[in-house]
Image: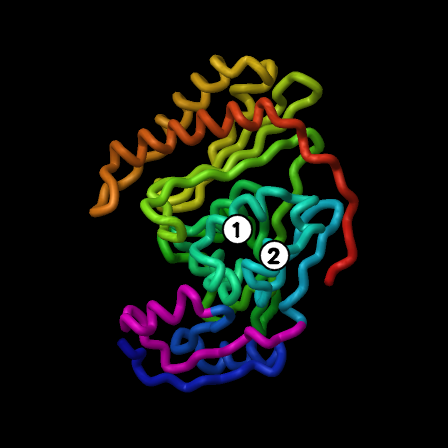
Amino acid sequence: MKPAAFAYNRAASVDHCLELLTQHGADAKLLAGGQSLIPVLNMRLAAPAHLIDISRLSELGSIEVTDSCVRVGAAVTHAELEADDHAYAALPILRQALVNVAHPAIRNRGTTVGSIAHADPNGEMPAVLALTGGTAHAVSSSGSRQIDAAELFIGPLETCLETDELITHVDFHRFPPGTRTGFTELARRSGDYALAGVAMALTAEESTITGLRLSFVSVTDLPEVLDMSERVTGMELRATTDLCAAVTEAVEATIDPAGDIHATADYRRHITKVMARRLAVELSCRPPQPPTAGQPDR
């Protein structure tokens, strides 16, 4: 399959990219890694008149770890973020999720911000951005704005971005001290889209739980967050029976998955509850990640 004809534009800078977006508007698509966009073009599910390549913009290629977040530029690939030890030390959930993204060859080209902007509910990184309460930083010729993850995603494959806006970077916010994180998903084959997936962050002070957040892959239309902090605060870490019961009930009440040729709705609901319970038990028995200070960007 071949895409419809388009004009290729390589942006020389962010300002040049914004000029092109202003000029072409809805007739243009941004190209970073292309691992989501190119298949869509080849299947002619989209036929933009212009592609704007931002993959070589050095100002979009940095990873910065601060005391409050891990900031990831729009040109950073999944593989680069996965391999960054400073980012892992600050937010282990990044690597925990990234190793599940497709195949190594795709992670070598695909970008994390591109995956987030694609807004696929089957994608891992939109769920992680939501779990961390992260923000996207968007710019256009008329100004800039910060968009919370809860506002960024408005539907499957849809964001609130305007046609002339570019996400320059996203901030994955760091969790409080005493937090353990985990990510798990089930796919028919390694590298396939997950039938269901769960990202989780459990926070505790000494032996008492003080917070619990979950987000989901492939079982909700949007990367929604289930915040169970109020419900589980005060539970003992090793009181896994009570924790599992609370998690099962909350997940059951939150998700309403759709069935398709890969799995029925009931099966997706069942495995999501099982994975959430198992992950909650695992995190309740795991020591927290040691705190780390911010690091210079690379």
Magenta span has 2?
A: no
Tell me which segment is drawn in magenta.
Answer: 34-58
- Judging by the rendered image, the residue that carries numbered circle 2 is 81
**Dot 1 or dot 2, earlier in sequence:** 2
Helix or strand or loop: what does disc 1 sit on? helix
* Residue 36 x/y as whole percent: 40, 64
Contact? badges 1 and 2 (CB < 8 Å)? yes
Residue 161 tag number:
none
Between 25 and 103, which is closer to the camera in this rendering? 103
Is residue 175 toward the left or the right of residue 121 in the image? right
Residue at 43% x, 60% y is 118
Q: Residues within 10 Å of mark 2 (few under 14, many from 20)?
A: many
Q: Quadrant of residue 93?
A: top right
Q: Quadrant of residue 237?
A: top right
Relative vertical location of residue 112 with respect to residue 129 in this rendering, above or below: below
Residue at 25% x, 41% y is 263
Q: CA distance from mark 1 to mark 2?
A: 8 Å
Q: Quadrant of the N terminus?
A: bottom left
Name the kind of residue labelled 1 in the image. Leu
* Residue 9 x/y as whole percent: 49, 84
Residue at 53% x, 83% y is 10
Helix or strand or loop: what does disc 2 sit on? helix
Residue 98 tag number:
1
